[in-house]
Amino acid sequence: MSTPDLEARLRSYYGTVAPDDSTRLVMASARLLEDARTARPSRSAWSVLRLAGTLAAAVVVLAVLAMARFGGGVTGPAAGPSSPGPTFDSTTALRAQVDTAGAMRNGGIWAIQGSYLLTSMDNGASWRAGTFPSPIGFTSYEQAFVLDQDHAWALTSDQQTKGTQSTPLPGTVSRTSDGGKTWQSAPLSADVQCPRAAMSFVDARRGFLMCAVPSTPGPSGPLAQSLLSATEGSGTVLATTDGGATWSIVGSAQGLSQAFTASDANTLWSTPDTISSELTGAELYVSRNGGATWSAVNLPGLASVPANTTVSVQAGPVFWDASNGAMAVGVDQCCSVDTIAIWFFRTADAGRSWSVFKEPRPYPLDPLLSDNATVGRVWTVIGVDGLFNVLVSGDYGATWVHAGGAGMPANTTFLSLDMFDQTHGVATVFAGPGTRVLMLTSDGGRTWHPADFGDARARLGSNSGDATQAANLAGNYTVMATKAPSVAWSMLSEYSQRAFGSEAAFEAVQAALGRRTNNSPQLVDPPQSANVPNLQNLGPGPWANLTATADITRAYVVIVTFPGTSEPPESLVLAPLAATGEWRVWVAAAP
């Protein structure tokens, strides 16, 4: 979506932004960025670039729209942190690109980098690499949950496209119990669609999957009128007791969303999306029977907020054991920035009672941020006097420390932030078009540096699942080359794109090939390791580029033949890129 398109969508739905439109502006910001910034590990590369462009456009437009509310000459995101400290290291950052990252439930850091699962138990000083079932070909999106260094799960789902509309198809949950050395898969029920999804495991065997259908807005017009025609979101819960080998539907309810977690094997939590919250007034739901039934939670103080107040979930719920949890909401009383605040809620008795802490200093709910706080054992308020400036509290709001965020890139903001304790944390940020970089801090957010994965990926070597991955990608590529050349073009390595010259030239070549062969490519099984058909077979050009840009230890060659024709075979080399771990296709000379 282009910047003019996004601005038109905002203005048509919410009208011209006036000084008393703060509630609608915050809702507009949250709604547009809620989808774009939902963590979706290991996207296919062609969707990553589209997401980066959409989010960049959203940031620019929302900054302009924010002028009416906050005043002054806002023309885009604020500059990078001005506090003394290191500057952003763009060279090192290129080696720290990830799809998403966070904290493992049992402690430590995890990151998804294309077809790699990376974990660290020493705050990023050293890393262990495994493979990850990254989406290829027709796969549209993916969610992951990492319990510990050995146990992780990934949800992938295909889409059926008709015209411009895409319908999610039943998904597949992949699982590993050896840190990504091997993966097994289990399909979900055909009765379940997961346009939005989240997983939560309490141990290696017991876990839950929330499949959520987002709410839909009403027609443009005044907020109250629009809500009359809006549709509330809903969620369906699936459960497993065998580590993800089988899944069963246990319950569903209105108001649930992909903001979801399990605090124990029976107690589940979910917050509604923005429209559902406006429709019902609820900010948190709980199930105490494993997802079968749900009820709204009474959070102290929210029932008595004045009319025309927007309450929006900013973080959580997060539980770090069965009893202790926290969440945060933004409370925005219409038309005066002096009344905007972050309220933190905490429980120490498994959510049976909650205490509220109202951060005494008011904070604008920055429309450039979809989340203005984080919770857990450590709380933060984000964007205080600068996009990377945060307030950090390790004692549940009793005291706060200001952190300036030196070392972060300018003109961008957090995509995600997790603080493990008062000194150590992990964040992802945009560092350029299509790049999401993993950043680490060891001084409570005062300074940040890109993650260094060292030789973790090189030590991984080839994997038994790589041959299947390569064969699937080759099959998808050969189909899309004639049916959807633009998609196949996106699968190619930069080397092969340069060799074809342009996307139009590639499309013409594939169309001519399809006519000569009656669109009947056939893959020769099984794929061969690229170490077998080496320089002599592939030719110096493709081989030199592979060794320079790809993880050659995981490269495979697939031979494509065209039965019943005189067309010579074609060699496809499939390998993950060294920088991002994403699989690509090299079209090599015939063997």
Image: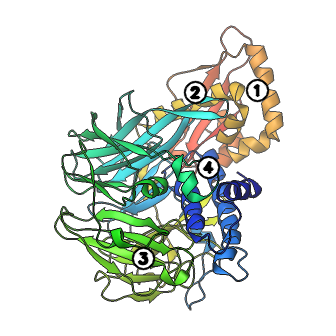
Q: x%, y% of residue 184?
A: 34, 36
Circle 1 packing at 10 Å, graded few (<14), some (14-19), many (20+), is some
Q: Vertically, is 401 above or below 239?
A: below
Residue under the point 61% across and 46% down: 47
- Viewer-side label of 1, 4: 1
Disc 1 secondary structure class: helix
- Viewer-side label of 3, 4: 3
Q: Pointers 3 and 2 in contact (CB under 8 A)?
A: no
Dot 1 corresponds to which residue?
510
Q: Pointers 2 and 1 in contact (CB under 8 A)?
A: no
State the CA–CA distance, disc 4 to disc 2.
Answer: 23 Å
**Looking at this view, is 464 or 347 the one in front?**
347
**Looking at this view, is 477 or 251 the one in front?**
251
Q: Vertically, is 501 above or below 81?
A: above
State the CA–CA distance, disc 3 to disc 4.
Answer: 51 Å
Return the residue found at the far top. 564
Dot 4 corresponds to which residue?
547
The type of residue carrying mark 2 is: Gly
**Looking at this view, is 205 or 55 the one in front?**
55
Circle 4 packing at 10 Å, graded few (<14), some (14-19), many (20+), is few
Q: Vertically, is 3 above or below 26?
A: above
State the CA–CA distance, disc 1 to disc 4.
Answer: 27 Å
**Looking at this view, is 113 or 245 the one in front?**
245
